[in-house]
Image (cartoon, helix red, strand yellow):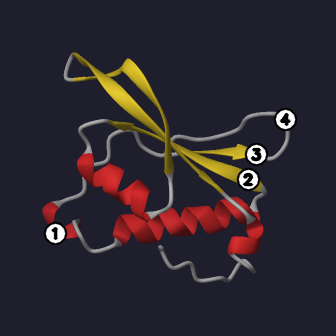
Amino acid sequence: MACAQTESRCVGETFREHSHPKPAQLSRGLGTALTEALAVAAVDLGFHKMIGKLFTDNLASIRLVERCRFSRVGLHRRHGQLDGEWRDVLVVERQLRARDYGSTSATIKPS
């Protein structure tokens, strides 16, 4: 996941390219809660967009970003390698607006 600043320069960080939760951590809402908390923090820091790149067969992550109001914006063909095999990568983004979140202490509920 990456964030782009509102200025003309581009800034961002990839948190972790390959995160694999343990079975006990699945379907508990942790990914949604973390993504929404990141959105609040990004707004507080003046960012206006979050960007994600996901392997196209990573259905759990695709469902997560769709739950968190990301839009599909593109596809990189044969963009990333996993286990020596070139894979397609889905590009998603979420526009951030401060008015959607209110103050820094706002509690965000996924839509």
Residue identified by numbered label 2: 47
Are the residues flagged by discs 2 and 3 in contact, CB closer than 8 Å? Answer: yes
Q: CA distance from mark 2 to mark 3?
A: 4 Å
Q: Label 4, secondary structure: give it.
A: loop
Q: Residue at x 68, y 83 (%)?
A: 105
Q: Residue at x 85, y 42 (%)?
A: 7
Count of residue discs: 4
Label 3 neighbour load within 10 Å: few <14, some 14-19, many 20+: some
Q: CA distance from mark 4 to mark 3?
A: 8 Å
Task: Point out the residue furthest to the left here.
Answer: 23
Q: Left of 67 or right of it: where is 108?
A: right
SS for dot 3:
strand
In-front residue for pair 74/26: 74
> What separation in Å lies between label 4 and label 2 (alpha carbons)?
12 Å
- Spatial separation of the CA atoms under disc 1 and disc 3: 35 Å
On residue 8, the disc is 4
Horizontal and vertical percent for residue 38? Answer: 57, 62
Q: Is residue 38 above or below residue 90?
A: below
User: Mark 1 or 3, which is nearer the eye?
Assistant: 3
Question: Relative to 65, is 77 above or below?
Answer: above
